[in-house]
Structures are given as structure tokens and as C-alpha cells.
Image: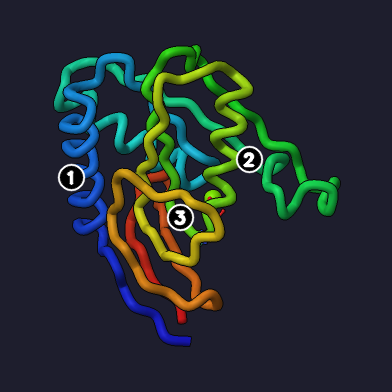
């Protein structure tokens, strides 16, 4: 198997910093903004993004987590034994601008399910999507508003997003 480094540690940091600035530009600041990470990689990245937004704007940004295990339309009914993850939104999403955060965007089914989970909790004014890697192969009409890297892949390839013991992203590797 052949591995290609897509982003090294510095590259990941720069991508997240750029995305933080893009989020601020698109939303004209952080008013009414909340971050929701998709377990587990997306939550770590949402924390990183939140830290950058707080640093730039000087206010805390609420960060929540959704686990979409039970919502995946291609899993439902087939894997009842899967552990049920928790959706932890320690804030109301009603009327909020929600920025969904995930590590890798592939078919789009996880994001569709995450939007279902969010709408179960309330009605946001909008939902935007930030991903570290868009690897293509969408099955649904879903696209990311903020992308770290677009990485053309074959369906059999895998993107590895590595995190250290403190859940900080360390690198992104394409595994052939
Ligand atoms: P989708 O639902 O879009 O098909 O897949 C996206 C979800 O599956 C994300 O939550 C992501 O973590 C995971 N995923 C899909 N493909 C990859 C991949 O190549 N690498 C990693 N690390 N996660 C992936
Ligand atoms: Mg995931």
C-alpha cells in the first residue's frame, strides 16, 4: 500500500486557521454562531476551529457534538447492535447559525443524518458545513461551505486523519 501525505501538521493548522477566517467572513463575525462536530474526528476539529474563532473574536463559541450512528440510512435496521452514540448539544440550536464540522466528506449520508439530528433539537436559521477533506463520491446533493483540501480518491482508497493524545490533528494521509 502506498501512502501520500496530503497535509502535515503545519498544513492542518493552516487549513483550520484559513477556515476560521472564512467562517468569520461569511457570517460577518460569530453572532449566533454555534459549532457542531460529528463524532469523533469532527468533534476534535470543531474544538480546534472553536479555539481559533475565540482567539480571533475574543468570545467563546459554543461547541456541541452529534453522533449519527442511528441515523445513517444505509445502517438503520441492519446494525442494531451498534453502540448508540450520544448527541450532546449543550445549547439550543433554535434560530442559530450552525456550522457542522467533520473530518472527511464522502457520500454525504453522514451529513444528511447529522442535519436530521440537529433538526430533532430545533430549527436553526441556517446550517453550514466545514470539512477537513472532501474526497468526492457524493450520493446526495450536499457540498461543503469550507474545505481544508479537496482530495480526488477512488472509492477503495482511504483518507487517514491522525490525532495526537490531546485530540489535536497531526496529519492527513491518503492510503492507496
Ligand atoms: P459519508 O457519510 O459522507 O459517506 O462519509 C463521511 C463519514 O465517514 C465521516 O464522518 C468520516 O469520518 C467517515 N469517512 C468516510 N470516508 C472516510 C475516509 O476516507 N477517511 C476517514 N478518516 N473517514 C471517512
Ligand atoms: Mg466520522
Q: Tag 3, which secondary structure?
A: strand
CA–CA distance in space, label 3 to label 1: 18 Å
Percent position (x, y) of residue 52?
A: 22, 33
Q: Mark 1 points at which residue?
A: 18
Percent position (x, y) of residue 75?
A: 74, 52
Percent position (x, y) of residue 119?
A: 57, 24
Q: Tags 2 and 3 in contact by the CB under 8 Å rule?
A: no
Q: Mark 2 points at which residue?
A: 68
Q: Is residue 126 left or right of residue 13?
A: right
Q: In this view, does 53 lie above or below 168?
A: above
CA–CA distance in space, label 2 to label 3: 14 Å
- The answer to whether any part of residue 166 appears in the image is no
Q: Tag 2, which secondary structure?
A: loop
Q: Mark 3 points at which residue?
A: 105
The reply to whether the residue tagged 1 has its Cβ within 8 angstroms of ligand 1 is no
- The answer to whether any part of residue 95 appears in the image is yes
Say which residue appears at 23% left-offset and 15% top-offset. Answer: 59
Say which residue appears at 56% left-offset and 37% top-offset. Answer: 114
Q: Which of 12 and 133 is in front in this view?
A: 133
| Chain-order first, disc 1 or disc 2 | 1
Say which residue appears at 14% left-offset and 27% top-offset. Answer: 56
Q: In this view, does 50 lie to the left or right of 160?
A: left
Q: Is residue 113 above or below residue 97?
A: below
Amino acid at each position: 500500500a502506498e501512502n501520500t501525505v496530503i497535509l502535515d501538521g503545519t498544513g492542518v493548522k493552516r487549513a483550520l486557521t484559513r477556515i476560521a477566517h472564512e467562517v468569520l467572513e461569511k457570517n460577518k463575525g460569530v453572532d449566533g454562531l454555534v459549532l457542531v462536530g460529528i463524532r469523533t474526528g469532527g468533534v476534535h476539529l470543531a474544538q480546534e476551529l472553536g479555539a481559533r474563532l475565540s482567539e480571533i473574536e475574543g468570545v467563546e463559541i459554543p461547541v456541541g457534538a452529534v453522533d449519527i450512528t442511528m441515523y445513517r440510512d444505509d445502517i438503520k435496521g441492519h446494525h442494531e447492535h451498534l453502540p448508540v452514540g450520544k448527541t450532546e448539544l449543550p445549547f439550543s440550536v433554535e434560530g442559530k447559525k450552525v456550522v457542522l464540522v467533520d473530518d472527511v466528506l464522502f457520500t454525504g449520508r453522514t451529513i444528511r443524518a447529522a442535519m436530521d439530528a440537529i433538526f430533532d433539537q430545533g430549527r436553526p436559521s441556517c446550517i453550514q458545513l466545514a470539512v477537513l477533506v472532501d474526497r468526492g463520491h457524493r450520493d446526495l446533493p450536499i457540498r461543503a461551505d469550507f474545505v481544508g483540501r479537496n482530495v480526488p480518491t477512488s472509492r477503495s482508497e482511504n483518507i487517514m486523519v491522525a490525532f495526537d493524545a490531546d485530540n489535536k490533528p497531526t496529519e492527513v494521509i491518503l492510503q492507496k
